[in-house]
Image (cartoon, grey):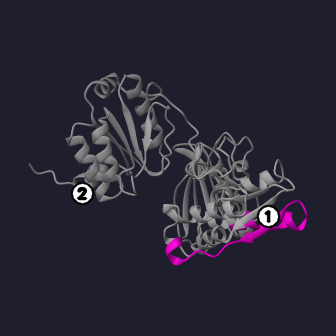
Amino acid sequence: MAKYVPGANIVINGFLTRLVEGELAGSEIVVANAVVAQIEHQAKLGKDSGLSGLAELRRLQELAEQGKIKLSFVGERPSVEQMAGAHFGTIDAVVREIARAQDAALLTSNAVMAEVARIEGLRTKYFEPSRVEEKPKLLRYFDKNTMSVHLKARVRPMAKVGRPGRFKVQVLDEKPLEEAELREIAREILEFATRDPDGFIEFEREGASMIQFREYRIAITRPPFSDGFEITAVRPIVWVRLEDYRLSEKLKERLRERAEGVIIAGPPGAGKTTFAQALAEFYHLQGKIVKTMESPRDLQVSDEITQYTALEGDMAKTADLLLLVRPDYTIYDELRKTGDFQIFTDMRLAGVGMVGVVHSTRAIDAVQRLIGRVELGM
């Protein structure tokens, strides 16, 4: 009987059960207690990755009870120091040691862990993330006119349908959703996002997660941060070019020749991001080097336009990098805090063409927000 030791990543992303139900059926799966402890710790913090990992371990146990695999848990639980150093590879090192001791092959979807294991002489099966063709349940709530879907425990599912500036809220089902249903949807989304190369977790904190899955931006919140379990998914439904807007020739000429400090202002849902995308593509087609600064990264732009998020959680560090990269134009989506306005100003004064997105009902309000947060003296 073939024996395998999985890393935490391949458990959390749901790929392991697919393997043992397919090509690894009838094998022995040895799970390190260090992996269980890591998943348990994440689940106690309310992180979706931990909850997804627990669900995966539960499914493995069910498969073992059905006699489809042999499942065992080995090794010591990690110390506090090892748990604190999980990001530095301490848990991965424990998993590799167990694979060596058990004379088993390592299963992982982490490229670095796979490479280190091969260097150490371990038999390794690396499963590279690949585009998932099936659709998660959440996307079944969307049709071609759906802008966003709003799901909350004990509340009827709702959707915002229409176009930016012209939309209405519709009830999708008269039956309120149960929290268990939402948890399953959240777990599935996390698995899809970690398995698909076009998906990633923007951030995961106690009570909230932000996930980008292809063109969908998905926010998951849970108590104590929110008063109930909630999933909100947003996607752009309009892809337009600058030529599709009714802009005067004078304004187009200004954008083309010398508009290098632009603020796009409007209320939520007014189409600011859509216009920013069109402007980014406009500059790109003019032969300019265009970058974006976003958190989360949800602009739908050409592959030639690189999208950056906050480096180590700090947009100022992203700005430092961009000043070295020297793009012609940078799209900053969006300016909210004082620091964002200061970064926008510093980059513009450094000679980078800047386009900023601001939530504001009127243009004068956007100007007021800008001058109230930056030093304009000489």
Question: Of 164 and 140, which appears nearest the observer?
Answer: 140
For the residue labelled by badge 1, is the local secondary structure a helix, a strand or a loop? helix
Q: Position of residue 116 (x, y in %)?
A: 56, 51
Q: Earlier in the sequence, mark 2 or mark 1?
A: 1
Quadrant of residue 352 within the rendered picture:
top left
Q: Amino acid at mark 1?
A: Arg
Q: Residue at x 58, y 61 (%)?
A: 92
- Viewer-proximal residue among 109 and 306: 109
Quarter the N terminus occupies: bottom right
Q: Residue furthest right?
A: 67
Choose top left, top right, bottom left or bottom right for residue 354: top left
Measuring 62% from the left and 63% from the top, which residue is drawn there? 97
Q: Residues within 10 Å of mark 2 (few under 14, many from 20)?
A: some
Looking at the rendered structure, the number of numbered marks drawn on it comes to 2
Residue at point 68% right, 50% down? 123
> Which of the two marks, 2 or 1, is nearer to us in this view?
1
**Which residue in the protein does label 2 denote?**
373
Is 233 one of the magenta-colored residues?
A: no
Any magenta on residue 73?
yes
Residue type for callout 2:
Arg
Give the numbered dot on residue 106: none
Tell me where the magenta segment starts and ends, as one range.
54-83
Q: Which mark is residue 59?
A: 1
Q: Is residue 257 placed above or below 21 in the rendered structure?
A: above
